[in-house]
Image (cartoon, rainbow, N blue to C red):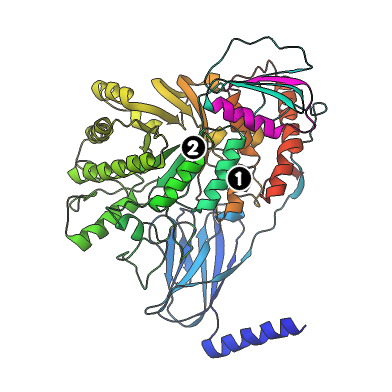
């Protein structure tokens, strides 16, 4: 009781001496017949003349009571406060598919004072139907055996009799022969195979029994795409994710580190990239972003959201010790707002216009997929290629100093909005850009990678040139492209940021449907076209707010992708065969993976939602 009384007195003293602490309260409205809902936002103890910022997913709003809500860029909105005290707003918006779509990250901004985060309380509409939360699947398929691990091994044989060699020794191949606890023989094709053999041994339960395993990956590229731009992951969090990847025998971290919202890698020659483009802070009354980018997703302030060169090299070395290659992605020529704005800040400081990324005379009007209106590079400017020449050189240097390979640099290439490059031929601009990036790559002996969009709509000469310098295309929205190396990352099967199901309590988007471990497990690479070299899971972070959210979306659904990357060609002659195979797979998750996650304190999903009529 004494402690509670002390806290109360401290709060009372704070309120008396320093004034009331501003708070927000948001109430969800019920959906009407027009497909909208009337939501209510109450701001308490806000001073007149201040401004309240918040983040909400891309969505038009119509105010019907109280101050006007202004859209800034991306997910950023603000409200100018006309009077002190309590301000009530009512506005029409879309009904929430999930609670994670509600407005958040409320920040009070006043001239001459530090920005102040605001506590927010939520009141959500109660569901009309009854939601039963149960275990997602009942483990079945027989008793889990000593050799059952994920990804599952190709061949296993109990006993001391020798197992006939399969004759297949691709990259990553290994064989483990166990006679007894002190007599284990390991053979392997290469260093990757040696590492995978050790990971398999780590997962085998003791005491060891007489046993032989022969195993190899079907796909030579087994990837995980980590977006740290919208919700930043610390170095320690990235290392923890690398440990999960190594456990699943994934071998490539596709590191999404530059996009509209932030630039997350230090480039010493261009300090504004991180000093301006990565500090998600709200400097004093910085409407025009003269000092730094405004936060556009998680809204957190006062933290550093980029990796120094030394931290990046630490990540590279940690990954390579686990036989994981790192491919950094700098999304271009759309999705480039952070770099564009940072280079404008660089120009203001130095007067140097040679790194200009966007033409001041450009009259283009467009609206990007994430609600940006100024995020496309002016690809006809020489500054674009001078800038990326510096970036390529720095990335090459960091990988060289870390002593690890640089398989490729990923240039993105997706979602360039209609309306960009006004007055210029769109196909010509795309060809100009691809050829310019190929010039940089070829001069440095670097391979390029990109989303499938970069290979479409090119002339034959550019297409052929791209083929020669391309490591892979990420296929995310189609069934593939003939004649190109393809990494499968179809949104409706491998995007881990999509919600597990339609429960409002889940995290995530649903524009490509719902994805759980059953969906990722069901991917069939043989149904896609092109030279399929790999499979990749993707974790976009616009709906994440913590490492806990990240692991929840990864576990267990990420294991289905890892399984399909290692064992790419399952034989399911019927739905019943698929169901039995998945049941066995999920049984292994419950028996072998979940205890490990619990020991590490990782948040994971193990519940399913069913509706009762």
What range is drawn magenta here?
192-217
Quadrant where the N terminus sits is bottom right
User: Is 208 within the magenta?
Assistant: yes
Q: Position of residue 288 (x, y in %)?
A: 31, 65
At 27% from the left and 33% from the top, the residue drawn is 444
Considering depth in this image, is 281 or 378 the residue closer to the camera?
A: 281
Circle 1 or circle 2, nearest the eye:
2
Q: Position of residue 325 (x, y in %)?
A: 46, 35
Vertical placement of residue 130 versus 490, above or below: below
At 62% from the left and 83% from the top, the residue drawn is 11
* Label annotation for residue 553: 1
Image quarter of residue 209 = top right
Crowd band around label 1 with a 10 angstrom C-alpha radius: few (<14), some (14–19), many (20+): many
Considering depth in this image, is 432 or 305 the residue closer to the camera?
A: 305
Q: Mark 2 points at which residue?
A: 320
Considering depth in this image, is 419 or 185 the residue closer to the camera?
A: 185
Is residue 607 among the parts visible in the rendering?
A: no
Vertical placement of residue 364 versus 523, above or below: below
Q: Which residue lies furthest to the front in this view?
A: 182
Q: Residue furthest right?
A: 143
Which of the two labelled residues, at mark 1 and mark 2, occupies the earlier sequence position? 2
Residue 145 left/right relative to 47:
right
Residue 526 left/right relative to 2:
left
Crowd band around label 2 with a 10 angstrom C-alpha radius: few (<14), some (14–19), many (20+): some
At 66% from the left and 48% from the top, the residue drawn is 503
User: Is 195 within the magenta?
Assistant: yes
For label 2, the SS is helix
């Amino acid at each position: 009781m004494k402690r509670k009384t002390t806290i109360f007195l401290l709060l009372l003293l704070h309120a008396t001496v320093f004034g009331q602490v501003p708070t927000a309260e948001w109430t969800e409205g019920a959906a009407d017949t027009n497909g909208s809902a009337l939501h209510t936002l109450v701001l308490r103890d806000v001073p007149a003349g201040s401004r309240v910022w918040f983040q909400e997913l891309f969505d038009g709003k119509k105010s019907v009571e109280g101050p006007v809500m202004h859209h800034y860029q991306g997910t950023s909105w603000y409200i100018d406060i006309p009077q002190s005290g309590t301000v009530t707003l009512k506005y029409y918006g879309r009904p929430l598919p999930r609670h994670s779509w509600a407005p958040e990250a409320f920040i009070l901004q006043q001239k001459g004072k530090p920005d102040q985060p605001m506590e927010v309380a939520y009141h959500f509409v109660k569901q009309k139907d009854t939601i039963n939360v149960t275990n997602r699947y009942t483990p079945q398929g027989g008793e889990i055996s000593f050799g059952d691990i994920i990804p599952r091994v190709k061949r296993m044989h109990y006993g001391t009799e020798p197992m006939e060699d399969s004759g297949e020794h691709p990259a990553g191949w290994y064989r483990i022969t166990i006679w007894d606890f002190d007599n284990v023989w390991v053979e392997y094709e290469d260093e990757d195979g040696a590492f995978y053999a050790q990971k398999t041994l780590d997962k085998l339960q003791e005491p060891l029994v007489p046993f032989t395993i022969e195993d190899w990956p079907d796909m030579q590229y087994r990837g995980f795409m980590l977006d740290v731009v919208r919700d930043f992951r610390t170095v320690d969090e990235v290392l923890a994710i690398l440990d999960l990847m190594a456990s699943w025998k994934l071998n490539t971290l596709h590191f999404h580190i530059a996009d509209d919202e932030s630039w997350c890698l230090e480039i010493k020659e261009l300090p504004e990239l991180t000093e301006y483009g990565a500090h998600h802070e709200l400097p004093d009354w910085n409407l025009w972003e003269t000092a730094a980018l405004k936060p556009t997703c998680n809204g957190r302030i006062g933290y550093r959201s980029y990796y120094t060169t030394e931290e990046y090299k630490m990540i590279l070395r940690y990954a390579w010790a686990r036989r994981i290659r790192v491919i950094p992605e700098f999304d271009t020529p759309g999705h480039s707002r952070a770099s564009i704005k940072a280079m404008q800040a660089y120009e203001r400081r130095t007067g140097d216009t040679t790194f200009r990324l966007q033409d001041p005379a450009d009259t283009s009007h467009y609206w990007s997929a994430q609600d940006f209106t100024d995020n496309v590079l002016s690809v006809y400017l020489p500054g674009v290629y001078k800038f990326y020449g510096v970036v390529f050189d720095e990335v090459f240097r960091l990988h060289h100093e870390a002593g690890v390979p640089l398989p490729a640099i990923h240039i993105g290439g997706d979602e360039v909005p209609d309306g960009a490059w006004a007055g210029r031929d769109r196909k010509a601009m795309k060809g100009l850009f691809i050829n310019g990036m190929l010039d940089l790559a070829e001069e440095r002996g670097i391979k390029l990678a990109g989303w499938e969009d970069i290979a479409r709509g090119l002339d034959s000469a550019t297409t052929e040139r791209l083929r020669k310098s391309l490591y892979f295309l990420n296929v995310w929205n189609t069934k593939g492209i003939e004649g190109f190396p393809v990494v499968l990352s179809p949104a409706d099967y491998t995007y881990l940021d999509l919600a597990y199901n339609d429960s409002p309590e889940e995290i995530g988007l649903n524009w490509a449907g719902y994805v759980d471990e059953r969906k990722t497990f069901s991917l069939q690479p043989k149904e896609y076209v092109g030279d399929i070299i790999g499979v990749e899971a993707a974790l976009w972070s616009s709906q994440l707010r913590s490492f806990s959210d990240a692991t929840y979306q990864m576990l267990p659904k990420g294991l289905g992708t890892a399984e399909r990357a290692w064992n790419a060609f399952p034989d399911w002659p019927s739905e019943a065969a698929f169901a039995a195979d998945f049941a066995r797979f999920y049984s292994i998750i419950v028996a072998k993976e979940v205890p490990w996650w619990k020991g590490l304190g990782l948040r994971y999903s193990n519940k399913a939602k069913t509706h009762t009529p």
